[in-house]
Amino acid sequence: MRYITLLICLCIFQQVQASPSKLYFPIAKEDVQNNTQTELASEAIIDIVADEVSYDQERTFYEASGNAETYLSSRKAKLFADYISYDTEAKILEATGNVKMIQATDASILEELRYDDELPAGTDAIYGNYISFNVGTSEYKLEEPRLYANGIKMLARELKSKYHTKQEGKKSKNILNFNKGTIALNEPISVYSHASRVRTLYGFKQRRQGRRRQVDWDDVSDKKTVRYTAEEVYYDNTRKTNNLKIKGARLWIGEHLSIPSPVHITTTVGAAGNTKFKGPIIGTRERIGGFAMGPRFFYETEPGIFSIVPLVQIGNGPEVSFGAIGSFNTPGDSTSVMAGYGQLEERFILNAHQNIWRKYLQVDALVNQFKRNSVFGSSQVGQLYDVSSDFRLKLPFMDDRGMRIRSAAGWASDNNDLFSEERRDQLAEERGTGGLGKEHSGYRVEFETDFYTKPVWRYGNEKYNFSVRGRSQAALRFYDTGDSLQVARFGPAFETRFDNLKFELAYLFAAIGGSSPFLFDQFVDGFQAVILDGDYEVNKWFTIGTLLTYSLDKERFTRNQIRSEFGPEDFKMRVSYDTIRNQIGLGFNVIFGDTIDFERLKVKI
């Protein structure tokens, strides 16, 4: 009989009547339940379900085989294995064969969970070949453990664990101690980064590799040309931020040469790993004035992370001045605020965002910042305060990105001093007779959408391929002056991957009507434009790319960004320069650990 439930409790010893040496098999589920559920149900230790269950009264020993599973309510855990045994006197539970233990912050989600079910949010899975569990002390040992948690994948030789139960009202904690193994990250994590978000082929390959990675013992090898080791790794899955600490990190080149890390690395992996306002400020992108440089200091609290950046500003002359930027953001950036002031141009900046209902309803405030738009590209506003809705619609003819639909309403104001001379001339030309004119302020409403179709034609394999898609964009804007601006453009997009070269080339036709009183949201790409976005990975140390837009009818570049990423695989310097906007982005990423071989790994879940 499949799924015979055995409740192990003290009262069972009084109910079983048999010869001490005889092994009873199977035990009827109904008999056990009738004897226990009314009298001592609250004293039940564990609940075992399997294809076959047996009991030895003399040894007070239980065996379960075939799709065996047990729910450990005191630990908020569920254990699966081919075979489970439990010695009630020694309080030792053992399991072998396809061992999988799932732990959850909310025990209720475990009750109906099966071995092959997809792990719901708030759960972690530990796999292994053999587990020995001391029910009395909440300690267990696991051989060949594999841990799949939020943001990491891990393999080790041995696991020793102890569950720490705290007083009611306080969170209990489970400390897992792994010995001699390797850890890989689902996505490369940035210990320090700059907000330029340079997109390169190397970064694309790293993210894809992390998502597909399966950790095995081939990853732990002294023969690798470049490898990373750590004396101790600490991962706290109860925290959303700063949840990974690496001590005694070393970069090995060959078998004998190693370079130690100068600091203990603390970073964030998982859902909160990619947030705004991370890393030092180097460049001109923050628009605080001049070329700004400064380190970022963090202070973590339960709600989120506070940071402060003292800045040195360098202007023409050169003129040197000072400023500062402070920020606060919650994990996942549902709330994010950045505010700063620079003496060089006596400029205040603000970038604030609040999710009201995910992306379906959100509030934003920008002062002297970039406004990113799918149709118009990035422009710069003096002030913008709006309420917006942003979502993606899935239709059969679209690719997996779907159709992005955004609507917004709010108040805006120009600041012409934010633009480079070349950009200001382009915007003024589009504005027509008004030219630069007076900086406009007022209310505006906008709707925009963009999408790619599924490939019309595709040829090749993963490394060498070519495809043709349709690309479409549209924007509709209304202003309190009575003006309106309509832009719709469409055309083919050619996507190509040729070994280490990856790019997209789009040729778009536009229909344009109306005009805008604002300078910052003029459409400068014209009726026909070519857009190129691509990167070439020269080798693992150097990648170069560009993002440019060329207006065919105006015969000029309306955007021309050159970008590069260079350095060893896990330490990349990043440089970008937009010649039209005169924007410089500098920074560096420490993407620690293709895999990290460790002596000890401590995990808190």
Image (tube, rainbow, N blue to C red):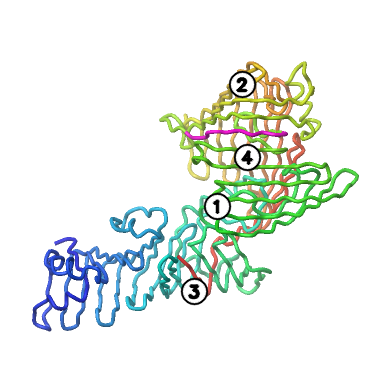
Q: Name the residue carrying label 4.
A: 534
* Residue 156 at x, y percent in the picture: 45, 70
Estimate the spatial distance between the alpha carbons at disc 1 and disc 4, rounded to whole Å: 31 Å
Q: Is residue 342 above or below residue 34?
A: above
Name the mark nearer the viewer: 1 or 4: 1
Q: Name the residue carrying label 2.
A: 478
Describe residue 437's horizontal placement relative to residue 36 as left or right.
right
Name the mark nearer the viewer: 4 or 2: 2
N-terminal of the pair, mark 1 or mark 3, is: 3
- Kindly identify which numbered label has been placed on residue 331: 1
Q: Name the residue carrying label 3.
A: 180
Image quadrant occupied by the C terminus: bottom left
Is 289 colored magenta in this rendering? no
Amino acid type, residue under disc 1 in the picture:
Pro
Q: Is residue 492 above or below residue 503?
A: above
Q: Nearer the viewer, residue 299 or 55?
A: 299
Residue at x 58% of width, y 54% of height: 304
Q: Nearer the viewer, residue 325 or 265?
A: 325
Amino acid type, residue under disc 2 in the picture:
Phe
N-terminal of the pair, mark 3 or mark 4, is: 3
Neighbours of disc 3 within 10 Å: few (<14), some (14-19), many (20+)? some
Secondary structure mainly formed by the magenta segment: strand
- Quarter of the image where one finds residue 14: bottom left
Name the mark nearer the viewer: 3 or 2: 2
